[in-house]
Amino acid sequence: MTASIPATAPDTAKLLAHLAAQPVLADRLGGSPAQWSIHEIGDGNVNLVFAVRGPAGAVCVKQAPPFVRVAGPKWPLTPQRVLFEHRALTEHRRHAPLYVPEPLHVDAGEHLLAVEYLEGHTVLRGGLVAGARYPHFAEQAARYLAHTLFFTSDLALPAGSKRELAALFETNTAMCQIMENMVFTEIFLPHPRNRWTSPELDKDVHALRQDTEAKIAVSRLKSRYLSSRDALLHGDLHTGSIMVSASSIAVIDQEFACYGPMGFDLGSLLAHLLIAYFAAGAHGGDRSAQQDWLLSTVEQIWGGFRTHFTDLWHTHATGDAYPPALFTGTAQAALETERQRYLDNLFTDTVGFCGAEIIRRVIGFARPADFTTITDPARRATAERRALALARTLLTAPTSHRTAADLTTTAQDS
Amino acid sequence: MTASIPATAPDTAKLLAHLAAQPVLADRLGGSPAQWSIHEIGDGNVNLVFAVRGPAGAVCVKQAPPFVRVAGPKWPLTPQRVLFEHRALTEHRRHAPLYVPEPLHVDAGEHLLAVEYLEGHTVLRGGLVAGARYPHFAEQAARYLAHTLFFTSDLALPAGSKRELAALFETNTAMCQIMENMVFTEIFLPHPRNRWTSPELDKDVHALRQDTEAKIAVSRLKSRYLSSRDALLHGDLHTGSIMVSASSIAVIDQEFACYGPMGFDLGSLLAHLLIAYFAAGAHGGDRSAQQDWLLSTVEQIWGGFRTHFTDLWHTHATGDAYPPALFTGTAQAALETERQRYLDNLFTDTVGFCGAEIIRRVIGFARPADFTTITDPARRATAERRALALARTLLTAPTSHRTAADLTTTAQDS
């Protein structure tokens, strides 16, 4: 959704004046501010996002109002979130520069963040809803995940550096609280923010509120989200947080970044690909090729992640965990077995978090366009019910899924 | 060991002048500084500790030199550690006031910390070496552990408060690094700081360096120490960090405090009681009653902890983990099952950390008086070898110990 806002409106005029005062932005845009255009391009739930274009180039500017954008002032939210996004962009770009846009400017007082404009990119979710496939996506996403998670973990960072980085993100409390409430808690209660396809899914929602096994499982995951400091997470890695072109991806919207369990990012991305898979079957027309591609992408992301993460552990084990000095000679084989055990456990986490994310996207506050654009409620409910069935299985029986193929098989059978 | 230092020595004169300038301390001591006496009473490895007495009362003053006390300036160490100790004392005393002394004064510039003087208390380790038993100790230690760990966890603290508290301790990097190196790494390498009963244990030490299974297990625990933020730990909870009288205990020396896995504190305390058990058998004379008491204390500490922790979870679940709103009515039984599962997992962690702590106290830098006061090397080596055998079993097969009785049975059989 692109809505043009006249550059003469007071807020955008002030915004342009602010940008003009930043040499790095003024140079990139070129010419004089009178020659710049500004368009609102955001379609997220939380912020205002503008494309600003000048004779020499463009920048993307995000403004964080002191509330959740789609809810308005009745749901206040710290505008400091742009600072955490800037920190996470900087840190993640250091490790995955091909897949993270360049931050150009942050201003805490104005609550705005400017990043490079991603020419020729669209939001992945929009492309998926329209039926597109992206042949390079799985490999790029796998590398992005392996690099950002490995290089911010105890496997790569000395403990002192990691503690310092973790402390920087410990105060992103307000944003983490949204996840703590929305992913792990509210959807199992009669909360006023919950929305679902009604009346078709009323019984399913009611059943979930009585589902003690699922509530135990989701609380266990919440406990992991609260107490694990495994790596610096994106924190909200869905298909609306990824820009794609035919050849590249750029991961955006790091404002939920915090130290947490790696499976949270991995599970979230797989969840949204599986949501797209279920939705594709209900959009009408033959989407079977896209559906095959989506399931194959799920398998390839995990497989690629596993390969790259293992490779990085072989080549860049500069952290304090599993000190290489302890595992020389014949002990190297045991360390390799331990690496695979570590990744098996991470997959179990991933499967659980994937289930939790799917559920909250079917009956929570932030339902994705994949589902909401299905105009026929009966078809929508069928797709959502299949997603819920898969999610419940993943949540309550994560260890019965040992491989990504197990996961996609369960998805097909759901 | 109590060594009197003349109050006219330059450092103590300066120290007394500093204390005199603090009304809270001057009032507590009473009279004039000329009436005050100062004695060095510390027997720890790291700091200088003084008892200062005046006509009205006494205070205990800890001074943190910019190096490890027993090693001297060749091993520098941040004198900021008194700040972390003060923070931890303050936080833990809030939750376990009966078992944590009152902090009275901290001065970052002078690197000193003053706490209430514990009249009539001695260091637990000294009492154990002398053959003493403390009938109330197990119950008091269990309550101390349950309260400090529960009330700083996600079960009691809202996520925002817990993140803030965790961030405060994330910069205690230098002290955590000592644990990361000494407990989990150096003892498995030919490190110059390692010491052991030689030549008697030379073969055992050599075998440990080749013990891949133990190195994998200890590295898995190190990874948990580095990435878990379960509760605010004491961080170095051995029998030298606990003062006892016939009726009470006081836990001191919180300078290693950090957020970490609960099993680290629990396992460390149990390790030192088991070390005392093995040492008691080698001190000469009939120590069987003390040995029985030590094993029973191990069982009672875990049993009491488990009971008190479960009770607190029933009555004070004010944190964000396992939200009580999700578990009403019949779901309460499932939550109770989950609580017991949580505690079973915590016991497995405890057993592993217990094993790691025992090993580093037999062949590492900081060997405890329990062993070093055994004058006959052959008897000492026998006790230490039994401790090592237990430790290896605990480290590599923690899940085969389901109860504290399993643990003490293995200790007796080692």
Image (cartoon, coloured by chain):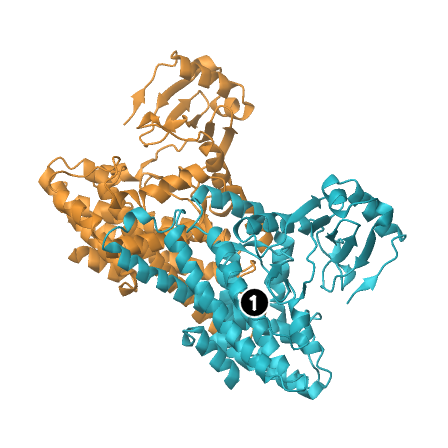
Chain colours: A cyan, B orange
Q: Which residue is mark 1?
A: A137
| Left/right of residue A131 with respect to residue B172 in the rendered view | right
Identify the residue shown where x is 45% and y is 33%. B81
Q: Position of residue A103 (x, y in %)?
A: 65, 48
Above or below, A262 against B56 in this view is: below
Q: Position of residue A208 (x, y in %)?
A: 58, 79
| Left/right of residue A338 with respect to residue B325 in the rendered view | left
Identify the residue shown where x is 69% and y is 45%. A106
- Name the residue type under label 1: Phe
The quarter of the rendered structure image containing the N terminus of chain B is top left
Q: How many marks?
A: 1
For label 1, the crowd category at 10 Å Cα-Cα, with few meaning under 14, some 14 to 19 and many 20 or more, is many
- Numbered disc 1: what chain? A
Residue A170 in view of the camera: no
| Left/right of residue A333 with respect to residue A295 in the rendered view | left
Q: Nearer the viewer, residue B288 or B150?
A: B150
Q: Nearer the viewer, residue A57 or A344?
A: A57
Residue A303 in view of the camera: yes
Identify the residue shown where x is 39% and y is 52%. A315
| Left/right of residue A121 with respect to residue A398 in the rendered view | right
Q: Secondary structure at mark 1?
A: helix
Q: Position of residue B398 (x, y in %)?
A: 29, 60
The quarter of the rendered structure image containing the C terminus of chain B is bottom left
Farthest residue toward the right? A8
Q: Position of residue A319 (x, y in %)?
A: 41, 47
